Image: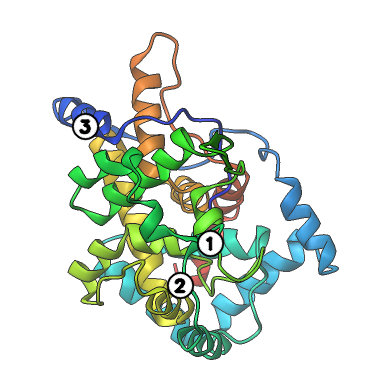
Amino acid sequence: MRTSLSKIPALSLLVVLTLTSACLGRDLVSVPPGNRNSEQPPIPNTSALRAKAFNTTYDEKYQKIVGVLRDDKDLMASIKKAAQAYQIDPIHIVGALVGEHTYNITIVNRVKSYYVKALAYSQSDFKFSYKDVTVQSFLKKPEFAHCDAFTGSAELWECRDETWDKSFRGKVIDGVTYENMTFQRAFFQPFFAGQTFGLGQISPLTALEVTDLVHSTSGLAKLSADDPQAIYRDIMDPDRSVIYIAAIVKDAMDVYKAQGFDISDNPGLTATLYNVGQPRRRALALRQAADAAGGKKLPEENYYGWLVNDKLTELRGLLGE
């Protein structure tokens, strides 16, 4: 997850809440199914390099994840159960999984092997840090103080993510060089580049963002950066991973609806947002563009979501539809 869709300026989430309130009087735009782009948008070079490194192709990777979804009845049952709990169409979870395992890490042959990885991570000794500074200490910097106004996990962690981009990313501050990388990559990837994040390829940062929703809907314990082992347990465990996927999709739908766009009928768009993250920032940018003269009026899918919409008939068939 978390590849760049476009260069969206860092915008204050306080502004997001203000504009969300203003949007309540607007007519809700139902985004129609299907792709806005007639051809698939460019696929990042990193995906091509990953496929080449493992001597495979996108089509082979696609067929592999489709095969797992078709044959693993327990996994499909978990998908449908999670979708029902979060009141979303299960095709959105299927789409997210298909996109991840087609363009990112290839799914393993047996989903149950992720349980072994979950156990290994949960027993490891590690922390979330960047240049030997823990994320807990880093967040005490004054630049993050305004984020404390948010009590919800999604708004709080997206504010911190945005503040990193605006105030630290790619800059030199007090003699410290902060690399041009995402907040997730800087602090929440403690093992190695390209490491697996389980079935859903959910980053620890994204899990922290939706932990309130997961707790209130599914009853799982709230996650904290103070306990990285618990975060890895949840994102690596296949059963819990599916729950987090549902929560991520539901959160994106709710955020876009608050800005006046119903994206629930377009699995390619929810897959796109699952891939790129930062739904609040992106929903606000779309709202502002839609309000501007000649601006974009509807959200568009990226390469990842385009595939999901293009293969929608086949993917719905996996659900018995």
In the rendered image, which quarter is residue 107 located in? bottom right
Mark 1 or mark 3: whose residue is earlier in sequence: 3
Q: Which mark is residue 318?
A: none
Mark 1 or mark 2: whose residue is earlier in sequence: 1
| Residue 160 in picture, x, y percent from top left | 36, 46
| Residue 179 in picture, x, y percent from top left | 61, 44
- Front tag of 2 and 3: 3
- Front tag of 1 and 2: 1
Judged from the image, the secondary structure of the residue bearing numbered disc 3 is helix
| Residue 92 in picture, x, y percent from top left | 43, 59
Left or right: 99 as drawn, with respect to 133 = right
Q: Which residue is mark 1?
A: 132
Q: Amino acid at mark 1?
A: Asp
Image height of 21 relative to 117, above or below: above
Left or right: 311 as drawn, with respect to 82 = right
Say whether residue 1 is visible.
no
Which of 57/171 is in front?
171
Q: Quadrant of the C terminus?
A: bottom left
Image height of 203 relative to 34, above or below: below
Name the residue rendered at 68%, 73% in the picture. 64
Say whether residue 246 is visible.
yes
Disc 1 to disc 3, C-alpha distance: 38 Å
- Front tag of 1 and 3: 1
Name the residue rendered at 21%, 53% in the picture. 152
Q: Which residue is mark 3?
A: 20
Q: Amino acid at mark 3?
A: Thr
Mark 2 or mark 3: whose residue is earlier in sequence: 3
Q: Residues within 10 Å of mark 2 (few under 14, many from 20)?
A: few
Q: Quadrant of the N terminus?
A: bottom right
Which of 267/143 is in front?
143
Name the residue rendered at 45%, 21% in the picture. 296
